[in-house]
Amino acid sequence: MMFLHGSRQAVVAAIVGLVITVTAFSYLRYQENQVVHDALEAETYSLQRDIRQSLVSHLFVAELLAREWERSDLTIKERWKENADIVTLYYQNVQGIAWLNDDLNIELIYPQNEQPELLGTSFSKTSLVGKLEASEGNRHAMMGPAGNLGRISSDIAIFVRVEREQNPGFLGFIISLQSLFSNVVRSNISEGFQLSVRSEDDVLFQFAGDSSLRDDWSHYHSLQLVGNSWELSVWPTTNHLEQLRGGISVAALIAGLLVTSMLTFVLYILGQSRFKAQQLADSNIELYSEIDERERIEKQMAYLAEHDSLTGLVNRNALKRILGEWLETESPHKKAALLFIDLDRFKEVNDALGHTVGDELLRRVARRITKLAPKSSVLARAGGDEFLLAIAEPDSRESVIKLSEQLLQALDTHFFVDVYELFISASIGITFAEDADFNAEYFIRNADTALYQAKEHGRNTYKVYDKAIHRDLTKKLELVKRLRHAVSKQQLTVYYQPKVELSSRRISGLEALVRWVDDDGSIIPPDEFIPLAEDTGLIIPISEYVMEEAFLQLKQWHDIGFEELSIAINISGKQLHLPELVDDIMERVNEAQIPPSKVELELTEQVFIENIQSHTRFMHSVREHGMSLAIDDFGVGYSSLSYLKNFPVTSLKVDRSFVKDLPHNEDDATITQAIISLARNLNIQLVAEGIETEEQVEFLLQRECSTGQGFLFSKPVPARQITQLLQQYKGLIPIQIA
């Protein structure tokens, strides 16, 4: 009888233990899955935003060009080719431009040699035709299927009505969605995520190598713009799913089974009835606690649907809904203002100090903004380091601008997080409801556009949305056109600046630098066109040209007897995204027949600390192929010292800002001494930039810095002058040359 009684206790204990274990495992598994869903939601939102911004930029340009045509005294045909050239040069996703007359007949097509049979025919019957026929009085762009103007069925068309006394009609951009999605996704998708874009049942674009989890783990988001809708789905790879989950639930399951087994054995041995009663009571308590916890989680999920989990603020979707409600009502809400706030240099904090410090900084920023926000306002976290402050009833435009100035001042003051004293700043874009035609989506878009202008003007400032912003775009397009022309007409040339052994004044190597020679013979400074080349992707062909020219020139110098010379090539951050970059460099090295050991690749300190994981693979590959690796502008950042010891760097170039005031500036002298000591201890070669005086040379030699470059020895000059110098003085720098 006692045995039976003990057996009953053991059975009850086993069941209760298994229930608790399975419940705990299920709950922890749910939490892990929630982490995965949150990550998918964040990635989906980020990609949706980037795709939307890309599409919106095409809408802006179409509207801007249409309005300019309305004001112009020139005919459409007189402006046609010039404007089409500029648009297709800058917007690579625009594969064609069309002009429809008021009867929707196709009158002009660009490029002219494509689909000439369509001229004089009607634009095919698509959903877009109805919008065009009913577009009288509509000043905004309309979007839909490209029909017979497209190359494939997924192509879309953007049309804007152009009201002219003579020859009114519709200006249309034919856009390849596949190209647009590919360009946006490949530049912005995070590692471990995959996606597809659908229109109804058709797959427009897919970026995936592992589709095994697509059906079970896809996070869907409707991408809507100007009456058009696509479905964006994002899912993780198998490896990334396990990384996001962690292993706590499995560990809890194993631990729970072990504990249950042990407890069952003990209860079977003891066989005490009161223990059975106590166990049942404990089970009831756990069960009630679980019910309460589930109710709490359900409430939390409903809350999180419209709130940011980190700061507790409403999210972007909730704010968009609120703005829509405001703008549907009568005044005074239609006087509403919107501030788009983006933190400057926040990524540096995350990379250097980790996400824990970064998250706490975001919470403190949110509290600081809230303290200054008016009562009739709503603060939302748009995502990442972006905030949206909506003001329902501002006193005036001037009061909104004054508030922006107060916010900039408040955010430019230090933050104390744990043991760190952090300094950041912010950029703010300001817009008003009336400038957005009282449309919530345009409201946020205009604020984002103004924010972009603020960042373009040096950050830590604000800009008010103005339609004149679009005129800056035209100027930028013209400069892009000139730069593309310069690349195609080989108006770019390569100059060389010697690197000199300070003690012997012997030239040990040369740095290759690109220069733009304009039609009038003047040299356009690199700081004017290099950032533009970075933004437009032209830096890729420019860098390839510099490498090819520099390697061939080095081969010539070797052939005339200067085999010890090396060449330094600057690598852009854009190039590091190319998967076969090292192979391409080595192909050019082999074609020029120069030793890889005489090639040095230079990365700026800022590029060096960005995307550490991917850049690490690049740096190790460079060293494995026998090339050298240098960090340029060293010392201007604050993150590099923590990474330097882990990377195969062969050379550091001390930034000229620390050298120019040597030896008289004590702070610069101290910093330079520290960098020299660091390089010596790590067995890394040191090169001082910006040397202009003999005093600087003496200071550096005394501290065992053996190599430098600067105007004291030579400015960057054409290859022929370097050749003359080498041959005349046998590789020495006797005096400063022009």
Image: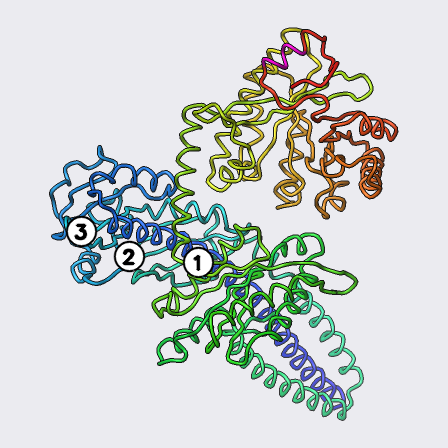
Residue mark closest to the camera, 3 vs 1: 3
Judge the density around disc 3: few (<14), some (14-19), many (≥20) Cα neighbours within 10 Å. Answer: many
- Amino acid type of the residue tagged 3 in the rendering: Gly
- Does residue 443 sit above or below 734 in this rendering? below
- Does residue 341 sit above or below 551 in this rendering? below
Query: Of callouts 3 and 2, which one flags the residue occurring earlier in the amino acid sequence?
Result: 2
**Residue at screen point 51% across, 34% down:** 539
Give the image quarter of residue 31.
Answer: bottom right
Task: Give the residue number, with chain letter if any, for mark 1.
Answer: 48
Q: Which residues are magenta?
A: 720-725
| Lateral position of residue 73 relative to residue 433, left or right | left
Give the image quarter of residue 657.
Answer: top right
| Lateral position of residue 555 relative to residue 163, left or right | right
Please state which of residues 586 and 315 is positioned toward the viewer in this rendering: 315
**Residue at screen point 66% across, 69% down:** 364
Task: Give the residue number, with chain letter if any, for mark 2.
Answer: 141
Q: Where residue 699 appears, x then y in whole percent?
A: 85, 30
Q: Where residue 470 appears, x then y in whole percent?
A: 39, 52
Please state which of residues 263 and 104 is positioned toward the viewer in this rendering: 104
Q: Is residue 407 located in the magenta-colored stretch of the structure?
A: no
| Lateral position of residue 388 relative to residue 274, left or right | left
Q: Are marks 1 and 2 in contact (CB under 8 Å)?
A: no
Task: Give the residue number, with chain letter if any, for mark 3.
Answer: 169
Q: Quadrant of the C terminus?
A: top right
Q: Is residue 721 located in the magenta-colored stretch of the structure?
A: yes
